[in-house]
Image (spheres, rainbow, N blue to C red):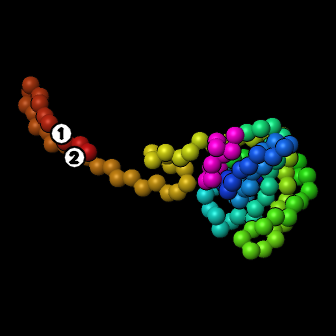
Amino acid sequence: MLLGGKILKAKRLQEGTQVELLQLPLDTDQEPTSDLTRSQGRLMVLHQTFLDPATLTPGLLVTFVGEVSGATTDQLDDIDYRYPTLTVKHWYLWPPATPNDRRGGPYIGAYGGMGVGAGSRGGGGSRIGF
């Protein structure tokens, strides 16, 4: 199964690293989108090797390939929540977005220019652009 989402939290376990993930739809590059309203819920992802939870901070986007391995029940606020579980085969942690990055939302730009020129046989001119 291929899926992705936003990391909510990560913790070490005896058998590896567990990541609580908010599932998000993937775009054509298999990167999770930022549209939280289209989430299908949460799941627990088990990476069978040790990954430092400090490197899997909340909010980072990740895409996983793995096998559904069952379900587990855990507390979510004041209720018992049934999390589907996925055992990871491959994964990709997307780099955090930068201020110049167009990921995660619309991009609006303004462009303009102006030119003034005059010339004679020898030529000449000036222009202003922004």
Observer-nearest residue: 70 or 2?
70
- In the rendered structure, the answer to whether residue 10 lies left or right of residue 48 reads left
Q: Label 1 belongs to which residue?
A: 127
| Vertical relation: 32 (above or below) 51 | below
- In the rendered image, is residue 105 in sight? yes
| N-terminal-most mark, 1 or 2 | 2
- For the record, the magenta segment spans 52-61
Observer-nearest residue: 47 or 114?
47
Q: Position of residue 82 (x, y in %)?
A: 84, 66
Secondary structure of the residue carrying numbered label 1:
strand
Give residue 114's mark: 2
- In the rendered image, is residue 31 in sight? no
- Given the image, on which type of amino acid does mark 1 rest? Arg
Q: Residue at x 80, y 55 (%)?
A: 44
Observer-nearest residue: 101 or 116?
101
Q: Residue at x 76, y 45 (%)?
A: 12
Q: Residue at x 59, y 41 (%)?
A: 95
